[in-house]
Image (cartoon, helix red, strand yellow):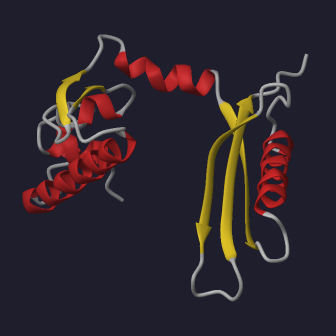
Amino acid sequence: MITATDIADRLGVASVGDPKLTERIPLETANKAYEAMRAMVEDAIDSMKISSESIDAILVGGGSIILPHDLAGTKTVECPEYAGCANAIGSAIPKVSGVSEKLVDYEETSREEALEHAWQEAIAAAVRAGADESTAEIIDSEDVPLAYYPGKTSRIRVKAAGDLLMKH
């Protein structure tokens, strides 16, 4: 198995561990993989932007040492001095999530009723997974009409997240 870090190490983008261990990766393979990594990050940046304007980006965590700093869709790309600590911080203060996903026919159930039920189910799923109910909130909601289903069927997907419940 080859990791993204192996690719970055092979191309000299990062220096992690013993470089002799990645010498066996063909350069052509490493270059193709690195371009795929770049494309995935650039697509993610585009999907998070609220306009077509270029943004300033800050790289943290493991990606900060292996990703290029000339990414499409960005004006600048910064990497703070302690960027590698972000993984540890994120692991130390996790959010716990839960999802509700279902098909609903709005001819049988009102949209408002279906969404309210999905929100409640998503929060309950987050709590079952270990979220503190007092901090659980809806973080994503989709309502997609499905023309190829009978009636007025939609796919509802709701995600909730909350702080990890700390038991004393």
Q: Quarter of the image containing the N terminus?
A: bottom left
The residue closer to the viewer here, 9 or 150, is 150
Give the residue drawn at x 22%, y 48%: 38
Can you tell which quarter of the image residue 68 is in?
top left
Give the residue drawn at x 81%, y 37%: 130
x then y, percent, for residue 136: 77, 32
Vertical comparison of 126 with 101: above or below = above
Give the residue drawn at x 83%, y 28%: 132
Left or right position of 104 against 53: right
Q: Quarter of the image containing the C terminus?
A: top right
x then y, percent, for residue 7: 22, 48
How many numbered marks appear? 0
x then y, percent, for residue 83: 36, 18
x then y, percent, for residue 52: 24, 42
Q: Residue furthest left?
A: 28
Q: Which residue lies furthest to the top in this view?
A: 81
Left or right position of 149 against 54: right
Left or right position of 113 against 61: right
Vertical comparison of 101 with 152: above or below = above
The residue closer to the viewer here, 92 or 17, is 92
Q: Residue furthest right?
A: 168
The residue closer to the viewer here, 5 or 32, is 32
